Image (cartoon, rainbow, N blue to C red):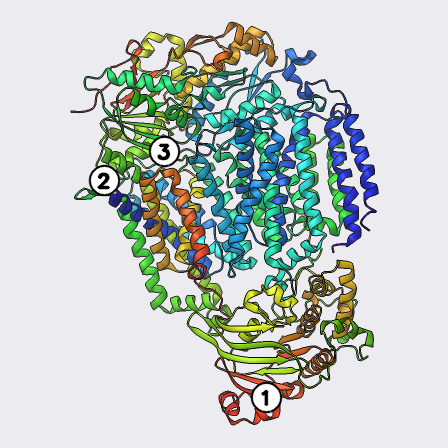
């Protein structure tokens, strides 16, 4: 009884061994087709299809919607101007429900099943990293809007639309503390609250061997860190205890290395304690909800590349004005709570322009050619000028257009660096 | 002072968690239905409050006039369905999980996945507070606490004093005996599920009052609410209230003493320890012989 | 139902063959002209098959629902992410580490949870729900694990002749999935699987029949965790970037439960079917314009299935395999020929949905599953009711008592001077909270006796039976079975020591036939045996109590009397020295009582001592060699029946208070 099944097992094992050794020689490109840009007679008339996911529901949805509208606007303009390589451009965008596991599955599906020609990155750093893993497998170029985790973005064909340089964990804190030092009475005591989400944690504490970040740089500059709090991502955080801690620490500046509606929750919880911090900085806030808080959120600072302030628009020319006003119409129609074409939309726009520059320079939708072309010639963008990509820096370009914005009288205003500012930084009251 | 404030704020918030847990606990203990769709009802209550208050410009608390009857009916209908299908305790968990997932997505389709919040004009409670010396209590948490205690206390009294209440308790202990005494179990269970639905309306309103709403929040309530249900003793409303206060204070303290990231660690370790060390104390209807 | 050895032997070559067949899809992908997209879809199906199978081994087979699948996925994924992604350890080694870590985790969870004597299914479910939250918080706060930023995984190096990374991932997934499904298959076809099924149907009964429930539950939990953990490593490679949110995620329990329930959670094939259907459905929904309806559709499927077909698709597929296969291929081919809109995958999906409908189409499900005593729902056609309700008149052939003989060390019923003491209670007390169910009960049961245990309602008779059978432990005092204190024995060891019991309300294993109900007891008896042998032995016991014609029926087809006889047959199959009959005659009509009494006599003649709890004094007087009267938890009288029955204290306590009923 025991020995009898051995015989068929041996046969099967032999069969399997045969199958494995006889395994065919593969071409190594797979059947994904368009990734290699094989000559296809109908290719010149067929539309170019670009695939991506965005978080249209779930935790990142508030910002994901902005990227959707910006992308649609960009492609409408592109198609109106004759498309790309003389072909129309179509965009398939799927909802990843803010779930990173789903991002990988959907990109896999877009590339191998829907056979899209090109891809665009999703929103939020963890999602982008998931998409990058899939893009790398298939050799697709991945332009992306907002990933900050520069050291982890090792795939050479990944191109950021928003850059704080190769070391955002040094650049962003440095820029903020520089700006603060310019105030008549610079803050001395700092409270730092960090959302333990990839990008925000990175800017507070660094990654790998580079442990620099808000916390260490604040200390290096002789500032006193009076409260240091980490909290998990997600809506379950109860903010009242955090607010209590911050209030009791009496900081001059609250740094919320958070994203989405974190600062809204925090400010609201502090307001309920009859406390309002002298000055607050928030890393990546969803722009709309903070403005809804009214005076409570006045003077809040955040990072920015572009805000449609009249002073900025006056310098930018008619194309920018057109983009901004078109976006406003679309966002209003989509019932977005905040309709200004600001940093997130700008990052999105940059990413799309990088992709288009690459395709134009390569003269085809061959992903390898696009990747090489971008490394060689860089990309031209409306909002951030000409960009160059150095693979040694993971393609993160110098942070020439990064600055700070502040809520002043109910709107976001660029306040730093001084030469690009629409208004000076409003110091804390009293 | 820092710790006292944290503990008190946590306890006030714990009252709201207890209110959420009470409906779940009663339905589990008495009706033998582990109704995860209860979270969906709370979510619905929150969004209805937001919608009604925002479009009619009325005080969010006044929306209860609409939401309580609406969710009473919804809860009763659900129970009617469970009853018709004669689902077992375990299958009710599966079935209502499916319902919850569908409800959350439906809310997301109706109100978008974006955060929704009543404006300061509609919701005057969001930024006001009451201070006692250095201690400060946010108005929304105070309202939540007071309403929760009133409802849970009232529910407890009703269970102890009224005929229906006694019928329910008899029903929880032994269905066949209760039936022998002429208790129509269908009517009683539908009534109870309706009341649980009503409590979900109140809990939802309190959420809409104090935080921005997002559909996926329903899943994030899971952990803490089940912690409260189990620690309080399944089917034991007063236990639920006490457990809510305890969990609220502890998680708030954990948050202040170490970091908010340790909150789930503390809360869930507590569940595990409680289940392991005092299982008998957790079974409101533990079987004897 | 489950075939025996032969099925297992078939599996030994069928599984490698199927695996090889699926491997060919990748190895000869280009020659076959298979697009990579299908390979990716298959990989996703494999990833979910691993998880669903992992869940099913514990929760489907044993009935202990777990909501903690994400704990294994997360542990496995982080083992790979930290070791391979951060420290460059070989990917293959991390698979082993993942398995080891998950095994330890399972031992910790099971060692704690299954030790709880009062553990109920829902409490276990919620305990497991808590675990991923705890581990997730740990991963998030600890810099050594994650710390909050997530860990990217580079593409590992693999033999170039395999082709693309997709090929490699597919093959790794295939090997792990094949291993997982094979494990489930092997478990289902072994004693292990039978033990789990018995635990699912009636755990306490299984324990009382000698099934080492703790060990089997723990083993199932470990097997489940190891598979889930290795699957988690594969998943980490699949997503390429691991964060707390992506692996300690409530989607895992949700989807594995949907898949297993959909496919059928009592069968090893269930999760596979479920994974195929759900993944393809999701894939198509995501590509359609209904993506915002995806979760609504999945939620609705779960609701409808639990309501309509709680046993899942597998039983339907196995009941009518050809119509189901026909529906899949027929529909797909028709859609293809008709050039229906959409892609081949859409047609396949429609085909699968049609097949699912065929499978669950009301063809009379086989599960009544009401354990409460009811009138027989449908008597098997092979056994007319009349012959079943009365045992065959023919006296049992002498050979039938033979298997019982070795049970008693010295099988001489007419014992010499001092019959051996089989069970001894010394000052036993048992309290339930404040209720003193038993107090100071001292009692001996000797070889060859039939002890009648009587007393008014609530006098502690059933409690005493539960104490003797080891399913309850005394609050004070000692119970010695064959010289061993039951406090030191697990309930299944008490069974092995020679005690068996029946239940007042019969508790058969609902998913097994009468024959297999009894075979269970043989298989897990003092001398473990194989299913084929056990079935042969079971037939003898079934014939002994007169249930022979019903051997192939499911318990739901039996009437109360037949179920009581099944209880007795099952208890006898453990070859007990002492048989405890707890109101085995309750609810029977006079003719049935007579036939049951006859069975009890036969058991006694075969050399088994009997303790019979009974209300009917007529029966007790007729049968018992000794009567013990309990009143309010204490022994009121103990002795020869006629003497006891005429004891004034007994008449006062027993007949006086409940005289109206006597």
Q: For residue B266, which quarter of the picture? A: top left
Mark toward the viewer: 1 or 2: 1
Q: In this view of the protein, which residue sits in the foreground, A175 or B14? A: A175
Q: For residue C99, which quarter of the picture? A: top right
Identify the chain of the residue marked 2, using the numbered disc in the image: B
Q: In this view of the protein, which residue sits in the foreground, C388 or C443? A: C443
As measured in the structure, the alpha-carbon distance from the residue carrying label 3 to the one carrying label 2 is 26 Å
Identify the mark at residue B128; answer none if there is no mark: 2
Q: For residue C62, which quarter of the picture? A: bottom right
Q: Position of residue C369 (x, y in %)?
A: 64, 62
Q: Which residue is mark 3?
A: A230
* Position above or below: C163 against B172: above
Identify the chain of the residue marked 1, using the numbered disc in the image: C
Q: Quadrant of the N terminus of chain C?
A: bottom right
Q: Are the residues at dot 3 and dot 2 in contact (C-beta closer than 8 Å)?
A: no
Q: Position of residue C238 (x, y in %)?
A: 59, 30
Residue drawn at (58%, 73%) of the image: C480
Crowding near the residue tagged with mark 3, few <14, some 14–19, many ≥20 C-alpha atoms within 10 Å = many
């Amino acid at each position: 009884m025991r020995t009898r099944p051995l015989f068929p097992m041996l046969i099967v094992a032999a069969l399997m061994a045969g199958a494995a050794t006889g395994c065919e020689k593969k071409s190594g490109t797979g059947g994904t087709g368009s990734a290699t840009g094989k000559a296809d007679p109908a290719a010149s008339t067929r539309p170019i299809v670009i695939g991506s996911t965005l978080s249209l529901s779930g935790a990142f949805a508030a910002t994901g919607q902005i990227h959707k509208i910006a992308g649609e606007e960009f492609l409408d303009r592109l198609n109106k101007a004759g498309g790309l390589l003389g072909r129309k451009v179509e965009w398939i965008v799927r909802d990843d429900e803010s779930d990173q596991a789903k991002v990988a599955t959907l990109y896999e599906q877009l590339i191998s099943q829907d056979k899209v020609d090109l891809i665009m990155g999703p929103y939020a750093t963890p999602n982008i990293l998931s998409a990058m893993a899939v893009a790398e497998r298939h050799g697709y170029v991945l332009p992306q809007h907002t990933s900050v985790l520069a050291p982890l973005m090792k795939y050479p064909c990944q191109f950021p639309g928003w850059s704080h340089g190769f070391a955002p964990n040094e650049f962003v804190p440095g820029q903020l503390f520089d700006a603060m030092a310019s105030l008549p009475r610079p803050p001395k005591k700092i409270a730092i609250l960090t959302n333990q989400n990839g990008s925000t944690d990175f800017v507070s504490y660094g990654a790998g061997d580079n442990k620099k970040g808000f916390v260490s740089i604040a200390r290096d500059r002789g500032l006193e860190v009076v409260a240091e709090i980490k909290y998990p991502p997600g809506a379950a955080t109860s903010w009242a205890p955090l607010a209590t801690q911050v209030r009791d620490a009496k900081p001059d500046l609250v740094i919320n290395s958070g994203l989405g509606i974190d600062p809204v929750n925090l400010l609201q919880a502090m307001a309920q304690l009859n406390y309002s911090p002298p000055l607050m900085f928030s890393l990546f806030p969803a722009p709309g909800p903070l403005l809804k808080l009214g005076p409570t959120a006045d003077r809040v600072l955040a990072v920015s590349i572009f805000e449609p302030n009249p002073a900025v628009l006056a310098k930018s020319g008619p194309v920018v004005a057109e983009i901004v006003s078109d976006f406003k119409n679309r966002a209003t129609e989509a019932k977005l709570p905040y309709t200004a074409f600001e940093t997130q939309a700008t990052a999105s726009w940059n990413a799309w322009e990088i992709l288009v520059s690459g395709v134009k320079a390569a003269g085809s939708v061959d992903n390898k050619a696009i990747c090489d072309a971008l490394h060689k010639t860089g990309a031209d963008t409306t909002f951030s000028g000409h960009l160059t990509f150095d693979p040694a820096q993971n393609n993160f370009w110098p942070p020439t257009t990064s600055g700070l914005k502040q809520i002043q009288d109910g709107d976001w205003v660029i306040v730093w660096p001084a030469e690009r500012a629409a208004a000076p930084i409003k110091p804390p009251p009293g | 002072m820092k710790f006292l404030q944290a503990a008190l704020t946590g306890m006030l918030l714990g009252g709201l968690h207890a209110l959420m847990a009470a409906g779940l606990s009663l339905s589990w203990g008495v009706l033998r239905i582990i109704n995860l769709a209860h979270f969906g009802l709370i979510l619905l209550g929150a969004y209805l409050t937001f919608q009604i208050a925002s479009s009619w410009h009325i005080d969010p608390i006044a929306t209860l006039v609409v939401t309580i009857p609406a969710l009473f009916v919804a809860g009763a209908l659900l129970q009617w369905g469970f009853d018709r299908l004669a689902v077992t305790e375990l299958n009710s968990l599966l079935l209502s999980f499916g319902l919850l997932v569908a409800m959350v997505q439906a809310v997301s389709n109706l109100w978008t996945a974006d955060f929704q919040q009543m404006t300061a004009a509609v919701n005057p409670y969001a930024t006001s507070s009451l201070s006692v010396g250095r201690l400060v209590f946010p108005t929304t948490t105070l309202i939540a606490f007071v309403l929760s205690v009133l409802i849970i206390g009232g529910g407890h009294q009703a269970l102890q004093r009224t005929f229906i209440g006694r019928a329910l308790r008899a029903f929880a202990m032994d269905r066949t005996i209760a039936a022998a005494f002429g208790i129509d179990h269908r009517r009683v269970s539908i009534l109870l599920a309706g009341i649980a639905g009503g409590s979900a309306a109140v809990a939802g309103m309190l959420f809409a009052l104090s935080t921005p709403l997002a559909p996926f929040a329903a899943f994030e309530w899971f952990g803490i609410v089940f912690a409260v249900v189990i620690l309080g003793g399944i089917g034991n409303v007063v236990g639920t209230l006490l457990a809510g206060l305890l969990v609220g204070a502890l998680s708030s303290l954990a948050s202040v003493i170490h970091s908010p990231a340790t909150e789930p660690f503390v809360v869930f370790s507590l569940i595990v320890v409680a289940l392991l060390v005092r299982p008998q104390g957790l079974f409101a209807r533990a079987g004897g012989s | 139902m489950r075939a025996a050895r032969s099925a297992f032997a078939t599996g030994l070559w069928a599984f490698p063959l199927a695996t090889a067949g699926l491997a060919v899809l990748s190895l000869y992908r280009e020659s076959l002209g298979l697009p990579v997209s299908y390979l990716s879809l298959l990989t996703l199906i494999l990833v979910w098959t691993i998880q669903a199978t992992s869940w099913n081994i514990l929760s489907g087979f044993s009935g202990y629902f777990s909501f903690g699948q994400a704990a294994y996925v997360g542990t496995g994924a982080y083992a790979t992410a930290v070791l391979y992604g951060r420290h460059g350890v070989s990917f293959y080694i991390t698979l082993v580490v993942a398995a080891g870590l998950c095994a330890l985790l399972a031992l910790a969870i099971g060692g704690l949870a299954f030790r709880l004597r009062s553990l109920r299914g829902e409490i276990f479910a919620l305990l497991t729900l808590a675990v991923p939250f705890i581990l997730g918080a740990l991963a998030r706060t600890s810099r050594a694990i994650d710390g909050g930023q997530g860990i990217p995984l580079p593409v590992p190096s693999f033999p170039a002749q395999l082709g693309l990374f997709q090929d490699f991932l597919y093959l790794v997934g295939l090997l792990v999935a094949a291993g997982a499904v094979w494990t489930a298959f092997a478990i289902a076809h072994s004693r292990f699987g039978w033990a789990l099924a018995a635990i699912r149907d009636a755990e306490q009964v299984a324990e009382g029949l000698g099934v080492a429930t703790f060990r089997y539950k723990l083993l199932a939990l470990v097997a489940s965790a190891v598979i889930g953990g290795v699957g988690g490593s594969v998943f980490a490679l699949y997503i390429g970037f691991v964060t707390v949110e992506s692996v300690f995620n409530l989607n895992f329990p949700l989807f594995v439960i949907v898949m297993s329930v959909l496919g059928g959670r009592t069968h090893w094939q269930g999760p596979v079917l479920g994974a195929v259907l759900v993944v393809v459905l999701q894939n198509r929904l995501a590509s359609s314009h209904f993506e915002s309806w995806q979760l609504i559709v999945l939620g609705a499927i779960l609701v409808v299935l639990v309501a309509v077909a709680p046993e899942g698709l597998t039983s339907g597929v196995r009941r009518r395999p050809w119509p189901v296969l026909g529906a899949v291929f027929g529909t797909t081919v028709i859609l293809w020929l008709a050039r229906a809109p959409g892609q081949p995958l859409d047609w396949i999906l429609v085909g699968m949905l049609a097949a699912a409908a065929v499978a669950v189409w009301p063809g009379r499900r086989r599960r009544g599953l009401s354990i409460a005593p009811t009138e027989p729902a449908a008597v098997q056609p092979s056994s007319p009711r009349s012959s079943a309700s009365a045992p065959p008149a023919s006296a049992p052939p002498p050979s039938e008592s033979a298997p019982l003989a070795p049970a008693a060390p010295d099988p001489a019923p007419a014992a010499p001077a001092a019959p051996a003491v089989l069970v001894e209670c010394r000052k036993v007390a048992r309290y339930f909270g404040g209720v003193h169910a038993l107090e100071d009960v001292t009692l001996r049961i000797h070889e060859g006796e039939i002890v009648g245990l009587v007393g008014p309602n609530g006098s502690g008779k059933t409690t005493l039976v539960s104490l003797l059978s080891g399913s309850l432990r005394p609050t004070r005092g000692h119970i010695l079975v064959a010289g061993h204190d039951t406090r030191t024995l697990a309930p299944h060891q008490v069974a092995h020591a020679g005690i068996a019991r029946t239940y007042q309300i019969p508790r058969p294993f609902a998913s097994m036939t009468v024959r297999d109900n009894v075979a269970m007891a043989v298989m897990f008896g003092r001398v473990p045996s194989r299913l084929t042998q056990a079935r042969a032995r079971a037939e003898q016991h079934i014939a002994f109590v007169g249930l022979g014609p019903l051997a192939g029926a499911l318990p739901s087809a039996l009437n109360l009397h037949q179920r009581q006889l099944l209880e007795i047959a099952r208890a006898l199959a453990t070859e007990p020295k002492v048989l405890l009959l707890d109101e085995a005659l309750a609810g029977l009509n006079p003719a049935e009582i007579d036939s049951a009494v006859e069975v009890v006599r036969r058991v006694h003649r075969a050399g088994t001592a009997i303790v019979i709890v009974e209300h009917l004094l007529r029966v007790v007087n007729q049968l018992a060699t000794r009567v013990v009267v309990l009143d309010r938890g204490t022994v009121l009288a103990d002795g020869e029946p006629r003497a006891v029955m005429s004891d004034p204290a007994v008449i006062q306590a027993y007949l006086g208070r409940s005289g109206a009923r006597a």
